[in-house]
Image (cartoon, grey):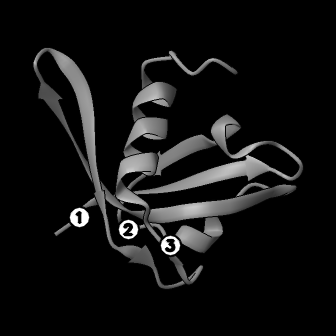
Amino acid sequence: MNDLKYIIVNMKGWRKDQARAIIFNGMVTHSTVVPQDFECIGAGFMILGNIDGKLAAKCWGKSVSLDIKSDPIFDAQIIRKTLTRTHPYI
């Protein structure tokens, strides 16, 4: 199976609500995607869907390479806000 993976990153010094999502192919290792000068605050696997006409993400698991667990509710919110460009800090 080739699930989508994601990381939730934050620039050092930013508040947690300013985090961004990076979504990538499951063949890529989580640790290779973290941008320089950012810290990873969440990571795992995801699927995208549509609930009541709105984009929704379901998140689970953890990154073994980063040793970081997913925070399913928070991570799904950041993913949705990042993909729909409704993040207040974009």
Q: Is residue 50 above or below residue 30?
A: above
Callout 3, which amino acid? Thr
Specify the quadrant of the image occupied by residue 14. top right
Which residue is at 23% across, 64% downward?
Answer: 2
Cα–Cα gap, marks 1 and 3: 12 Å
Mark 2 packing: few (<14 Cα in 10 Å), some, or many (20+)? Answer: few
Amino acid at the residue labelled 2: Met
Please give left or right for residue 69 compared with residue 88 in the image.
left
Q: Secondary structure at mark 3?
A: loop
Q: CA distance from mark 2 to mark 1?
A: 7 Å
Residue corresponding to mark 3: 29
**Looking at the figure, which quarter contains the N terminus?**
bottom left
Check if mark 2's residue and mark 1's residue have beta carbons within 8 Å: yes
Q: Is residue 21 left or right of residue 14?
A: left
Mark 1, secondary structure of its residue: loop
Give the crowd class for mark 1: few <14, some 14-19, many >=20 residues within 10 Å: few
Residue at the spot of label 2: 27
Seen in the image, is 57 located left or right of residue 70? left
Q: Which mark is residue 2?
A: 1
Pointer 1 or 3: first along the chain: 1
Q: Amino acid at mark 1?
A: Asn
The earlier-in-sequence mark between 2 and 1 is 1
Quadrant of res 61: bottom left
Question: At 75% across and 54% down in the image, what residue appears?
Answer: 35
Q: Is residue 38 toward the left or the right of residue 42 in the image?
A: right
